[in-house]
Amino acid sequence: MEAPIWALINLTRQPFGVKMTEFEPKILAFLCNWCAYRGADLAGTSRFHYPPNVRAIRLMCSGSLDPVYVLKALLDGADGVLIGGCHLGNCHYQDGNYKAMRRVEVLKNILRQVGIDEERVWLRWIDASEGGLFSETIKQMVDELRIKGPNPMRKPWQVWQETVGGKSSIESKPKKERVK
């Protein structure tokens, strides 16, 4: 069975001064290497304060993100997903951010149709020199997700995986021995 994306990321630590009973959203951020990831790095090196609820995955371009990974993150327990890329017209791969914008629109349409709150997925343009914007975006996203509460898909998906989805049809078939 495939490990959930959150099994790879340690989110068991609680921020200092936060009670264990308070809801702390889990945010997975897919960040463009050239702009958004460097903006996050600038936020850290400039010591801008933002909640530790985010885990970043660096992509070469926001346009290379397959929406399936966003959906998988939400199903595996992420309370929100941030997709960060270069400002429009400033992509190092010419039109990758336009591709990301189109893909996120399609993804949000799919999320609406299956009953998942589309506002849990954010697409933001953050430049390498905008560490403050990255910090404010994370603060704002955490605040809004605290209001929304935990991702309602987390528990039903976990139950489905443990019962029906635990084994794929390929795994459940007996293996045939080779005849020599």
Image: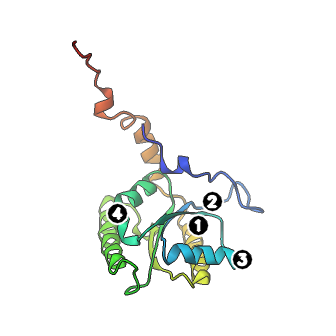
Q: Give the numbered dot on residue 23.
A: 2
83 lies above or below 89: above
Give the x, y percent position of residue 60. Answer: 43, 68
Between circles 4 and 3, the one closer to the viewer is: 3
Q: Callout 3: helix, strand or loop?
A: loop
* Residue type pointed to by label 1: Arg
Label 1: which residue? 146
Q: Quadrant of residue 98?
A: bottom left
Give the x, y percent position of residue 103. Answer: 31, 70
* Residue type pointed to by label 4: Leu
Q: Residue at x 43, y 41 (%)?
A: 2
Q: Residue at x 65, y 51 (%)?
A: 12
**Label 4 Cα neighbours within 10 Å, binned few <14 / some 14-19 / many ≥20:** some
Q: Callout 2: helix, strand or loop?
A: loop
Label 3: which residue? 47
Question: Which callout, 2 or 3, points at the residue further toward the start of the chain?
Answer: 2
* Residue type pointed to by label 3: Arg
Structure colour scheme: rainbow
**Label 2 Cα neighbours within 10 Å, binned few <14 / some 14-19 / many ≥20:** few
Q: Are marks 1 and 3 in contact (CB under 8 Å)?
A: no
* Residue type pointed to by label 2: Phe
Q: Residue furthest top?
A: 180
Q: Are marks 4 and 1 in contact (CB under 8 Å)?
A: no
Q: Give the numbered dot on residue 111.
A: 4
Q: Are marks 1 and 2 in contact (CB under 8 Å)?
A: yes
Give the x, y percent position of residue 65. Answer: 38, 65
